[in-house]
Amino acid sequence: MDFLANWLINIPGFAVPFALAALGLIFSERAGVLNLGAEGFMLGGALAGVGLTLNGAPPLVALGGAMVAGAALGLVFAVLVAGLRINHVISGLALVFLAQALTSYIANENDWANQSFAGLQDLVLGQDIVVWATPLLCLGTVWLLGRTRFGLTLRAVGENPGAADAAGIDVTAMRFAAIAIGAALMGLAGGYLTVAVSKIWVDNVVGGRGWIAIALVIFARWHPWRALAGALLFGCIEALIPRVNAAGWAVPQYYLQMTPYLATLAVMIWSAARGGDRWAQPAALGQHHIREERD
Amino acid sequence: MATTENLSLRERATKPRPAFRLVPLLEPRQKVGETRRIAVYAASLGLAALLSVLLLAVSGVPPSDLGTEIAATAFSSPRALGSVLAQMAPLVVAGLATAIAFRANFWNIGLEGQMILGAICATAIAIFDIGPEALRLPLMMLAACAGGMGWIAGPAYLRQKLGVSEVITTLLLNYVAFNLLLHLLYGGWKDPVSSFPHSEQYEAVERLPQLGWQTLTWALPFAGILAAALWWILSASRLGYLLDLLSANRDMARAVGVPVAGLSLAAILASGAVAGLTGFVISAGIEGRMTQDFHVGYLFNGVLIAFLGRNHPLGVVIAAFFMAVLVQVGQSLQVFFGTPFSLVRLTQAIFIICVAGSEFFLTYRMNFRSAS
């Protein structure tokens, strides 16, 4: 019983980073930008959260800083992918490499590594404010993408940039905006990870969660509510690991650590075998728009 | 009133448009000359080098000292050159592994996982003393190939049969492989002598022999032979020609009868095998055992080297040498100036972004003139 209660109460905290990162990815990818930089934006946000907190900023300010840091890295990515029209995969990888090196460098220069802090406190029912805000952010995303002119424009750019351009939409500007909003959300996801969950910085603290979020978005077929459900599923798995360790069951520890990655692979395989992802994904995902080029 | 309106209309019609647009119109280039290609590539390297020097200057290494540092750490003595060349061997193999996959349009981001599996399989041969001593090294080599291939086979199958993006599957398997490595090294494969979490030391017959010059082992010639063989396959053989055709235009290749699926699968598996060999080269050629962090940074290095070397084996060798110098200089700066090693990684990231960005100037022509 104790086991179950401890497990359940820990799920939301583990699910939130996945949910926020997935929402960020949905913004970017619904505008047609294949975004493999998730891990990088999350690292940027995670470091900003740690840096601000260690310098005395209250947790909510630190989380705000994490969003700014994510968005700043997002602009670098946007220049590469939407400005210079570099291959989406290369741009994403380059961004992740840059963020890994940059965060490790900055943390090292400022001696931020391995210093624990109090971080974000719980609000109600053992959950902090970001947990409560996440469903609202999801609702906001659904409304913004589905019910506003901005959302319609964003999706038009992701489905058929040529037609959007002909209709007078500035495709490049729209993609910059989508990437920046998405990167800010992913920065928040990373910031939450350090400010509220780990409460400490170690290099590569994000540990592949950005890549899991990318798989999650495919699994959710680019829809915010389904992404939230997927995030909960992964939260369940991640929250289980420390519980099983604490319960002292004889499961080899490193096999246990593999489970989130194996579960992601399983979900990707299931999702592909189910079929139909190709119809669900934004039609122009990963394609550049050049007005002077014939399709 | 009416006249002013008419005037303003006429004014609008005849008003000279600005001859300059701030955001240029992008025109795709039909073809790019070799001179332009080289010039743009050189310019991007120059820009990256300039930014790196600036970055180092900001973190306390004066540019004047940097030149002497590079000369001193890499080229001043046979010993210095020897250690650069020793660093270079696994980098060449890692770059080749990545380049083969990239040539087949397969984003193999799972280099580290495949390296780990290669090293695990080779180490199993060494620990359990499988096979006669004379055949031990070749067996370890084959095992490393098989391990790397096995680790990439899953993503290759998923990509070809189900269309699952290999970027994510190969990457996720890195984490799985790393945990498997830790499971072994903290469990049954712990060094029985020191009980540290690395494998027992390989016996002499399980290590690549010394070359007899500085600390170099056969790892370097091995990497050289591999590069030469791949250069021949990719540039001179029928297989390489078909692979070029395939990566240039998959549909066209299929239409003219190239066995597209089989050929890509062969290239992908080869990439995994060479990645496995990277693990073997580090374990048997440098460390003399399997350590728990031998793979760290190789994914990044592999992508960067393949990218700088334009996926060409000769280019890979040159880029790997360049990276080995960079790593060596980074280590020496760490000692003398206290600059963190992550600065080297940052420099590498700058190079990858500059070279990636330079592609723009080859693909498009910027038109700043306003449309008439």
Image (cartoon, rainbow, N blue to C red):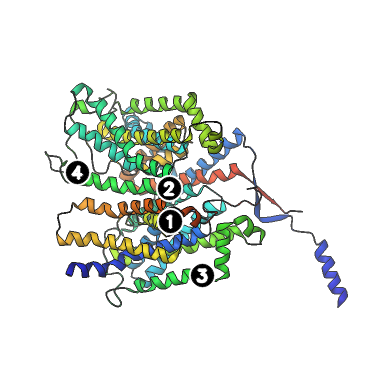
**Secondary structure found at label 1:** helix
Q: Return the chain for callout 1.
A: A
Three-letter residue code for mark 4? Leu
The residue drawn where x is 41% and y is 69% is: A64
- Spatial distance from mark 4 to mark 2, Cα to Cα? 31 Å
Q: Position of residue A87 (x, y in %)?
A: 51, 47
Q: Position of residue B297 (x, y in %)?
A: 34, 44
The residue drawn where x is 63% and y is 57% is: A163
- Can residue A51 be seen in this snapshot? no
Reading the image, the residue beneath label 4 is: B185
Question: Where B199 sits versus A172, above or below?
Answer: above
Q: Residues within 10 Å of mark 1 (few under 14, many from 20)?
A: many
Q: Residues within 10 Å of mark 2 (few under 14, many from 20)?
A: some
Query: Are labels 1 and 3 on one chain?
Result: yes
Reading the image, the residue beneath label 2 is: B165
Query: Are labels 4 and 2 on one chain?
Result: yes
* Residue situated in front as seen by the camera: A118 or B289: B289
**Secondary structure found at label 3:** helix
Q: Residue A144's mark?
A: 3
Query: Are labels 4 and 1 on one chain?
Result: no
Reading the image, the residue beneath label 1 is: A218
Who comes first in sequence, dot 4 or dot 2? 2
**Secondary structure found at label 2:** loop
Q: Quadrant of residue B261?
A: top left
Q: Position of residue B101 (x, y in %)?
A: 43, 37
The residue drawn where x is 27% and y is 51% is: A258
Horizontally, is A167 left or right of B52 in the view? right
Mark 1–mark 3 CB contact (< 8 Å): no
- Spatial distance from mark 2 to mark 1, Cα to Cα? 10 Å
For the C terminus of chain B, the image quarter is bottom right
Mark 2–mark 1 CB contact (< 8 Å): yes
